[in-house]
Image: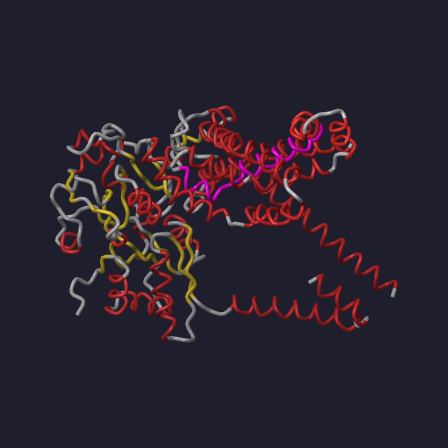
Amino acid sequence: MFELCHLAFVQDGLMKLRLPWILAFIVAISMTTACQRSRAGITVAGSTSVEPFAELLAEEYMSSRSESRIYVQGGGSTAGIEAVITGAANIGMSSRNLTEAEKKLYSVIVAKDAIAIIVHISSPIDNLPLDKIREVFSGKITNWKELGGPDHPIDIVTREEGSGTRESFQKFVMGKEDISLRALVQDSNGAVRQVISSDPNAIGYISLGLVNEQVKALRISGVQPNLANVYNGKYTLVRPFLFVFSGEPAGEAKSFIDFVLSPQAQKLLLKEGLVPIIEKLG
Amino acid sequence: MQVQEKVIERILLLIALSSILILALITFFIFEEGIPLILKVGPKAFLLGEKWIPSKGLFGIFPMIVSSFWVTLGALLFGIPLGLACTIFLSELIPPSVGTLFRPAIQLLAAIPSVIYGFWGLIVLVPLIRNHLGGPGLSILAGSLVLGFMILPTIITISEDALKALPPSYKAGALALGATHWQTIWRVLIPAARSGIVAGVILGMGRAIGETMAMIMILGNAVKMPVSFLDSARTLTTNIGIEMGYASGGHRQALFATGIVLFFIIMALNTLAIFLSRRRAG
């Protein structure tokens, strides 16, 4: 900005003319930004676990309806539900079940997400009961030897405080026990997977959809984590992804949730690694 | 014409003032958000508490203060000898024409984004440390090594300036008295430029304490008191960086409070550096 004025001033002394133009330009830019913001649309806010999927769905939805605007924001499950109650957002995203107090809101399960316990691809361990996993993460079992593996300390990898995935893991696996303070902490599913794929002695947990050939997902008491076992209820580390409304959805919000529940959108979610709520996708 | 100059002067003054205003605003908000939590938990429990479990209302950041100092100390152990050697080499031992080749290369070190340093550390250093020295690899040692490299440009640039600022008579006098080139460097030039070199080291220290992204990637972020250089650790900055995504309420305030502690540490270091370089000038 300063550069521009300076040059103009030096070059031809047309400062008198230029400065108002530049100011007008700035005002024009800020006005267009303001206009874009005020255009009608609906806001979806909440869980950062659901956010990337919601963004994808919103993009897909908007691509066929040019007049619609859907704004997706993060903030966390609780913040999203709060936003729906106060009216700051039209739809809240939650990666946990609603509490008793929140049950008065209208909620729809849009997909499910399984949590897989993962180890290094070369690990001789491929099956653990839930209570052993709990003892590993609480720091009671510290060596793979105690689980029938090599004599080597276990590197536990967990998510950071406040993460929805950690919250679900705490609930499903740990119960009242705390995750050991010795645990390495990573701030995303991807980072956990990266650490475990390179450390032969590591164990951690991530979304089932993000398990790839770099890591090995453990069977839990013999149950393989896969879509079939999630549907038949054998694999229990499953959390719902909810959309929350202040009341019966209407208008744009209704049209968006209808799209999200359609086979087209559910197929998209399946491709991204989530567990769709429709079992048979033709 | 004169009126116009006055106007331009005023506009520039406004722009200059706005940078101070922004700084003041940032400071104000950090304190406004953080102070209530420190008062609620108690300054002693906050600064000297050893347990950080936000979900249970435990906000002790002592392990992080200790870790910050360990990592910084480690970085200085690598950075000072390397930096000093490089400075001596650049300013005394090579012809100026070769120096013009090396100097930009060193300055380029400062231009590499920290996420690249972190990635390099994660992919190259961490497995090396895990395979040869044990532990999870994500460790203070890995962090210190990477930080040691990151602070090199700061140390080298400022120390070289300090050496260059010495009166030429120092070197001429020492050589005339029969001292060898090395004796002149080690016994005369370095001690004479000491305060400038120390200022460079302190600024490097400030950079080391403030580094976040690379450290999140290679320190492992465990929230316990580190007992060896092969342990995982969490510094003050990485605590904020890793948990800000989901933090709300008291947890969020605690992260701001962590920022306050960091604020005072950096202020103290910068003041010290300014004081030392003033003394050199005077």
Quadrant where the N terminus of chain A lies? bottom right
Estimate the x, y position of residue B234 in percent, counting from the top left.
43, 34
Q: Is residue A99 left or right of residue B164?
A: left
Measured along the vertical axis of the image, is residue A17 above or below residue B174? below
Q: Residue at x 31, y 39 (%)?
A: A157
Q: Main secondary structure of the magenta part?
A: helix
Q: Is residue A244 left or right of residue A31?
A: left
Write the start and end of the magenta stretch as one range: B192-219
Q: Residue at x 76, y 30 (%)?
A: B170
Q: Is residue B44 left or right of residue B221?
A: right
Measured along the vertical axis of the image, is residue B254 above or below residue A32? above
Q: Residue at x 26, y 37 (%)?
A: A201
Q: Is residue B27 left or right of residue A192?
A: right
Estimate the x, y position of residue A104 in percent, counting from the top left.
31, 52
Is B47 inside the magenta-drawn segment?
Answer: no
Measured along the vertical axis of the image, is residue A116 above or below residue B270? below
